[in-house]
Image: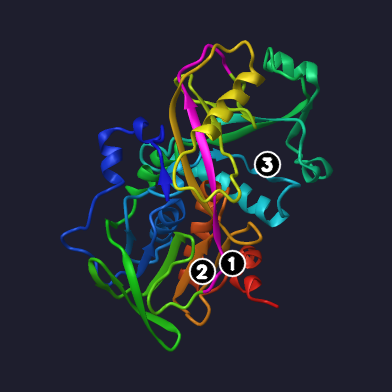
Amino acid sequence: MVSGRTVWIDQLDPWERSVLDPGVPETLERRPDVLVVGGGILGVATAVACRDAGAGSVLLIEARRLGAGATGRAAGLLVPEAHQGSDPRALVELGRTSFAQWRALDATVAGGVGFLDRDWLGLAPHPDGFLADPSPAVEWLDAAEMQQLLPGLAPAVSGVRIRHQGRVNPLLALSRLAAQIPQIATGCTATAISAREDRVLAVSSSAGVITPGAVVFATGTPPTLEGLDLRLPTDAVKGHLVVTEPVPVTLPGMVAPLATQLEDGRLLAGGTLDIGDATAGVRIEVTDRIRAELAAALPHLPRVRLTHRWCCWRPRHPDGLPVIDCLPGLGNAWITSGHYRTGILMGPATGSALARWIVSGQRPAHTEPWAIHRHFSS
């Protein structure tokens, strides 16, 4: 579920927009070697990785358009080092691997993926875990040094700087990656599966029956399909973001929890975690609070108008960590779900891990922490 218009779609050209919604091809591949269900960053990255790994013919289907869910409404920040100490070490390592792959994709995909090298600055107070086990890349800055970087910052606080992190427009990155996928069908909803013994034989969809060699479900929250009894616990956490009009201030990087500056001088702020908010749309009081907090932190900033307000729901498992695994009892079906706040960052590494698993038949060792059985053990 999503609400409000994002800034990202406005930054795309007509071709990039068309890639996100090609519709159903007249000659849909009915027997792909790999079928990917889900058109967010995890699905698109997996489909690209399967193609690159030599997995055979690849078809991706998406019920709406590519990036219609949480992917297209994320902030697009790629900051693996900021997770050090606060998240499990395995997640940090996965993020570092994926970050390196984002850089590589920007160099190898036609036109790049829009990767922007940016420093990340975190304002105090910091999470206890971060303080106890900081990243080796951290530079500690006292309040005076932070004031030099952010004149007028209120209150005057210390912080950290991590150089050479990154950011993408998630829809731009998605469109550039999607252009590499052999076949995509949007407006194509998976409705059921049929299985025999330990294999998925067919996936029914609104465009007809597809009989894949392997299938990957990358639907954010676990798929709900006839014939698939997957009771994987999950919920979704609402969050709001805003973008301002251009401001006469230059931020020294991505400043957490304050804002990130876009190329035209506008500020992207928010990324709230609205735990327990089940309302359906943008709450103006939340977005107004984001703007008020921005004004309080930068009191010399003139009152700015918000040009965009939006919200989305991030898929989450109870432990806040992703699932990357083969589906129980099915030897040719995989799932990746519940990436919560790290889906954009983890897309390339997750996709390449699944592609290697499909091609080799062997689970990559670094996916062990993300096994599905942890949610069913007593």
- Residue placed most toward the observer, 49 or 214: 214
Does 261 appear above or below 299? below
Residue 247: x, y in percent? 51, 15
The amino acid type found where label 1 is placed reads Pro
Between discs 2 and 3, the one toward the N terminus = 3
Q: Quadrant of residue 170?
A: top left
Q: Which residue is mark 2?
A: 357
Q: Which residue is mark 3?
A: 81
Among the two numbered marks 3 and 1 on one chain, the one whose residue lies closer to the N terminus: 3
Colouring scheme applied when the structure was drawn:
rainbow
**Rendered view: 211 above or below 159:** below
Q: Which residues are magenta?
A: 231-250
Kind of residue sitting beneath label 2: Trp
- In the rendered view, does 63 fall on the left or right side of 287? left
Sequence-first disc among 1 and 2: 2
Residue 15 x/y as whole percent = 26, 38
Q: Secondary structure at mark 3?
A: helix
Q: Which residue is mark 1?
A: 364
Identify which residue is drawn at 36% across, 40% down.
110
